[in-house]
Image (tube, grey):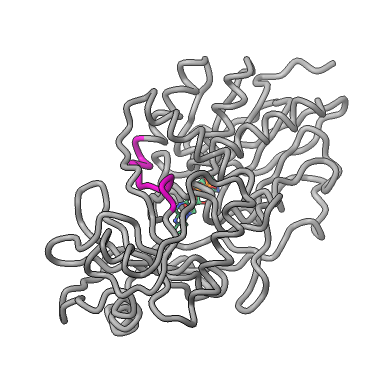
Amino acid sequence: MNEFDFDACVVGAGAVGLACGYALAARGLSVVVLEKAGAIGQGVSSRNSEVVHGGLYYPTGSLKARLCVAGRRALYQFLDTRHIDYRRCGKLVVASEAAELPRIEAIARQARENDVEGIVEIDGAAAIAMEPGLRCVGAIVSPQSGVFDSHGYMWALKGGIEDLGGAVVVATPFEGASPLPGGGFEVRAGGDAPTRLSVRLLVTAPGLSAQAVAATIDGFPPQDIPPRHLGKGVYFRLAGRAPFEHLIYPPPIPGALGTHYRKDLGGQAVFGPDLAYVETEDYGVDPARAAGFYDYIRHFWPGLPDGALSPDYAGIRPKLHGPGEPQPDFRLDGAEIHGLPGLMTLFGIESPGLTSSLAIGEAVAARLLASA
Ligand SMILES: Cc1cc2nc3c(=O)[nH]c(=O)nc-3n(C[C@H](O)[C@H](O)[C@H](O)COP(=O)(O)OP(=O)(O)OC[C@H]3O[C@@H](n4cnc5c(N)ncnc54)[C@H](O)[C@@H]3O)c2cc1C
């Protein structure tokens, strides 16, 4: 039996890696989280909509459906306990013309099958009574959707890991691992003070680097590394007063939930993200994309004034599917896939990964400990 430096090592201190570290530490394991950047939460978790998703859209029984609903329930509880800011403002999924009604009816059915609480279908007049600026012929109300302070959340997870005796080490890239005879892994960590650690369990949650990180693990079958696609989305901010209190979502676009409206915790209105496949991690926002945003937004909010949108920020989704391909589920791959006991590799943790993060952490910890 090996003696280990740590029971578990997690690669990546985004929302998902931190939630995995927290779940493992809460089970009494000694945990180290390795982060290559100089601070936690600088990856995909810092460039998103900060929406707490209800769990409406995903195929029933999929990881996305189950972990989003469970993760959302756990997230609100966590935010309450830790006094982290959020607003359960609710969401309207709106049909702005009759042709969209069957699509939102299908979403309502899917949401009920997914056990999402409080879903109500309303007609256009009722929706406009709730949000007078809307162009709407019918809507779904999802009262459990909201917005939250994702950075406060990640700092609380880091604090939680440390309170439980774990460590979150920044500026320390994971550079590879080798399985040890008798179980566990030797982990190679870089940075200013390169080191080697022995660990019993290893979790990789490096967001956009999931494929590159898996390729540095000796014995990881190359055919089990899924393709990597980068799905960029940009946001535009509205000058002036936020027009709606609820999140407003048109029916989804192919491959993503698409451009929606949110009033952020600072009270400002933001629209986005659209979807464009890119080859490099470039976070620029091309002001020329505004034209498409005006057309799209005026479909559900005709009152959008000319010149009111300015470029804000961009995020990149770690996608496993290319343009036109069906959107796959999250992948939490254990030894049954890659053949390496004690290792969980996470791939394709795009939306609703932030909402699902606590439930992903629980699932990863439960599966690793069940097989250990
Ligand atoms: C535009 C957009 C909008 C979204 N909106 C929402 C939303 O509203 N609600 C929602 O629930 N989800 C949303 N998502 C999805 C959500 O943001 C992600 O699922 C989630 O943040 C992924 O977290 P993560 O920890 O897996 O990845 P990350 O946050 O990227 O964390 C991975 C970390 O690993 C580190 N890392 C990489 N390689 C190494 C290495 N070799 N060694 C050490 N560290 C390494 C990175 O530096 C990074 O900090 C959105 C995503 C995008 C792109």
Which quadrant holds residue 246? bottom left
**Left or right for 128, reference 13:** left
Which residue lies at the image location 64% right of the left edge and 52% below the top edge?
A: 113
Q: Is residue 11 above or below residue 259?
A: above
Q: Is residue 146 magenta?
A: yes
Coordinates of residue 135 in the picture (x, y in percent): 30, 75
Q: How many discs appear? A: 0
Quadrant housing the N terminus = top right
Coordinates of residue 149 in the picture (x, y in percent): 33, 41
Quadrant housing the C terminus = top right
Coordinates of residue 282 in the picture (x, y in percent): 42, 68
Which residue lies at the image location 54% right of the left edge and 55% below the top edge?
A: 56
**Left or right for 163, reference 294:** right
263 and 220: which is toward the camera: 263
Q: Is residue 158 above or below residue 355?
A: above
Q: Is residue 157 magenta?
A: no
Which quadrant holds residue 94? bottom left
Which residue lies at the image location 54% right of the left edge and 49% below the top edge?
A: 353
Q: Which residues are magenta?
A: 142-152
209 and 152: which is toward the camera: 152
Coordinates of residue 2 in the picture (x, y in percent): 80, 18
Which residue lies at the image location 58% right of the left edge and 38% below the top edge?
A: 70
Q: Is residue 278 above or below residue 83?
A: below
**Left or right for 24, reference 317:** right
- Among all residues in the image, which is located at the extreme left? 240
